[in-house]
Amino acid sequence: MFSWLFPSRPAPKARPSARPSLEALEDRLTPTVTFNPASGVLLLRADPSSTYEYVNITPSGAKSDGSTGVNVFSSLTNYQTETFGDADHPVRHILLDLKNGQDTDNVQIASLAATDISVGAGNGNNFIQIGDARLIVVVAGTGYNNIQTGSPAAVGSPFGFNEEIFLGYTYNVDTTFGLISPGVFVGNDQGNYVKTADQAGTFNLIQVGGQSLVNNGSGANIINTGNGDDTISVLGNGSNYVNAGNGLHHIFVVGNGNNKVNANGLGEIHVTGNGSNYVNAGTDPDNFVFLDDRTGFSYVAAAMGASVDINNTLVTATGFYGPVYVQFF
């Protein structure tokens, strides 16, 4: 049930080299910063007992994309600047393993277009800013998250998506390839802020979850995306705001809050719940809107010719359909 809400992640593509090693959160004991010149993996790992982590990463060397090294200034380096990688040993993957405590993480990573960036944060309050990168993955738990990212590159990804943001999950660590992946769903009831600047031609996934369908979250999430092809899923009873750019979008919002959804490109919008919802499907006549709202007063605006389904009834004309007003333009 609800498999359509949280689409399954495509299986990773087969890789010819070393076998990845997944490490449980409990195994992390001390803060470390290490760089493997052979694999290009830069690992920053926090101490579980720490209550605050600060990470600032900028390019070093002749190029600004990470291919000639990076500078790290962090609480994990005792607030000293350390340089990792060079032109012969580029930093290909940056992996932040920031533990699962009730702490605060402040992460600032400059644009590093030649580098994969993966951030695993815990259940505290996380402030994460990432510039352009080759691949972007962020997984965080139950706390408040303010996440702002540039654009991933429009290149092939082992996950099928160029950018992935999961809020309400534990995470797994792959130190061999320098990647984070979502683990167990734990829910997120906070009012998170997510803003991405994904460019056209990229494939991006954002998932934000409440505790459960029985006891949904109450956070009022704000999600803004760029012009890539975005899949956005939000579960919870908060009044969420979702604004998707000009790409191909798949938007799913489930809960009893008063949600507002704007979509400027082509795609589908699903809203389920008893709140007073506002849906603007944009100007493309090939868009799809599915609204299941039987008690709250809601408004749907769509281009003439768009497919609009209100409470399992396909409508084709402007007017009231139960508590829902549909306007075609």
Image (cartoon, rainbow, N blue to C red):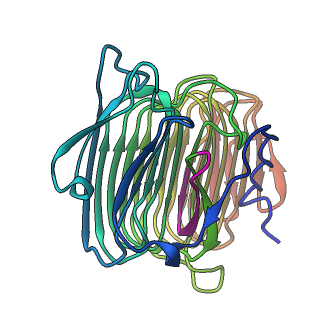
Magenta highlight: main SS: strand
* Residue at 18% over, 56% down: 78
Q: Which residues are magenta?
A: 165-177
Name the quadrant of the C terminus: top right
Question: Percent from the top left, x then y, of residue 49?
Answer: 31, 79
Residue closest to the eye, 223 or 177: 177
Question: Percent from the top left, x then y, of residue 205?
Answer: 62, 46
Question: Percent from the top left, x then y, of residue 149?
Answer: 41, 39
Question: Percent from the top left, x then y, of residue 70?
Answer: 33, 32
* Residue at 66% over, 59% down: 21
Residue closest to the eye, 114 or 225: 114
Q: Residue furthest left?
A: 79
* Residue at 37% over, 29% down: 111
Task: Please count the marks in the image.
Answer: 0
Residue closest to the eye, 228 or 221: 228
Q: Is residue 310 magenta?
A: no
